[in-house]
Amino acid sequence: MSAITVTVTGMTCGHCVASVREEVGEIDGVTSVDVDLASGRVTVEADRPIDRSTLAAAVDEAGYQLAE
Amino acid sequence: MSAITVTVTGMTCGHCVASVREEVGEIDGVTSVDVDLASGRVTVEADRPIDRSTLAAAVDEAGYQLAE
């Protein structure tokens, strides 16, 4: 098991949260995705290590960006 | 043909716009729905008169409210 937490900018509503959750959840090995709209915090658990760049690509696919 | 314009509050992103457009577009007789996110202005064209209360119900179904 591995866990990584990133901050996503630009999410404004529950639809945005759902989009991020869906795209990140499609990454191979991901077992859970927790998204907090207020803080932008996204916590991902997986059965293997997940690169930040892989996460960034999924977040971009959803239409959002990782904070620096 | 009839047209009615209302203002919807609470839309924050393109997903919100899509939700409102979808629900309002399902009202019988509606032929076009134009949603402006910045102003909240929703303009509906239909082949029959559409009540404000019918529009309000569709907007509520999408998760938003009409402004007074």
Image: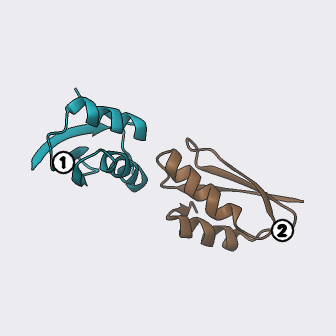
Chain colours: A cyan, B brown
Identify the residue shown where x is 38% and y is 46%: A12
Q: Position of residue B17 (x, y in %)?
A: 56, 50
Residue A35 point in image, percent of width and height: 26, 51
Q: Is residue A63 visible?
A: no
State which chain disc 1 sits on. Answer: A
Of the pair A44 and B42, the residue shown nearer to us: A44
Image quadrant where residue A28 sits: top left
Residue extending furthest right? B1
Toward the viewer: B43 or B28?
B28
- The residue that appears at 14% across and 40% down in the rendered structure is A49
Image side of residue A9 versus residue A52, left or right: right
- Label 2 marks which chain's residue? B
In the rendered view, would you say A64 is above or below B29?
above
Q: Residue furthest top?
A: A68
Q: Amino acid at mark 2?
A: Pro
Considering the image in quadrants, where does the C terminus of chain A appear? top left
- In this view, the residue in front, A49 or B63, is A49
Which residue is pictured at 37% across the width and 51% down the height? A22
As helix, strand or loop, the secondary structure at mark 1 comes to: strand
Q: Amino acid at mark 1?
A: Thr
Secondary structure beneath dot 2 equals loop
Identify the residue position indicated by label 2 in the image: B49
Q: Quadrant of residue B60?
A: bottom right
Would you name the residue on which mark 1 appears?
A43
Q: What's the distance in space between the residues labelled 1 and 2, CA to CA?
A: 49 Å
Q: Position of residue B37 (x, y in %)?
A: 56, 44
Mark 1 closeness class: few <14, some 14–19, many ≥20 residues within 10 Å? some
